Image (cartoon, rainbow, N blue to C red):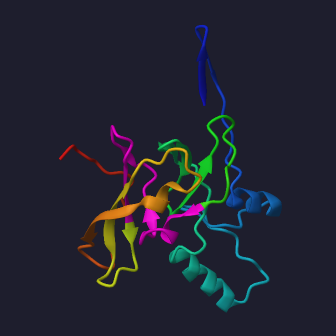
Amino acid sequence: RYHIENGKVTYSCRALESDTHEKNMAANRIVVSEFGTAAFPDPCKTIFQRLQTTFQTMMGKNWTDNCNVSVGYFGDQLYAMTETNVIRRISPEDLHIIGDKTNISDYIALNQATAHPHVCHDGTVYNMGNNYRHKRGPHYVLVKIPPTFGSSDTCYSQAQIVAEIPVSTRMFPSYYHSFGITKD
């Protein structure tokens, strides 16, 4: 966070105290796998329990809430984001977490979303993600999130799917970090 006053600029930051962060700190090791970081296997789990955990993570049930990629406003609500289906609302004053994490999949058919949504001049937010459970195979999904002001609901409570694009090769959906948007 930057603060500009009387010709001086100050900067402050903090680590997001997510559930993932807290679990890792309590265990004093990585216990939640993330992109590029594998958790050390729990020695108390059987081989079948480990396999089950792997598939649950792949299907988005155990995605990290360690939202450390970007932050952005959805209406008057500030959210921290990462490239999963989980976002965290944070306070713009002290960057502490507000309320529970938002699992986007609870609101729309989206298993993963970019951490770089686009905000239009009227406050409408557009984001892209993947739907791996579509009945006709994996799809890329464009989502429209109307601006919400003065609401305690999550920003995704009014989200709607604008477009779905089928993946050209079902077994190899593309990775994308961001996307472009124009007026048209």
Percent coordinates x, y for residue 40 in the rendering: 70, 70
Q: Residue at x 50, y 44 (%)?
A: 149
Q: Magenta span has 105? A: yes
The image shows residue 77, relative to residue 177, as above or below, that is above
The image shows residue 94, relative to residue 40, as above or below, that is above
Percent coordinates x, y for residue 43 in the rendering: 77, 80
Task: Name which quarter of the figure residue 54 lies in.
Answer: bottom right
Q: Magenta span has 138? A: no
109 on left or right of 52: left
Range shown magenta = 102-129
Choose between 16 and 173: the one closer to the eye. 16
Percent coordinates x, y for residue 49 in the rendering: 68, 87
Q: Residue at x 44, y 60 (%)?
A: 158
10 on left or right of 146: right
Q: Is any part of residue 73 visible from this angle?
A: yes
The image shows residue 48, relative to residue 85, as above or below, that is below
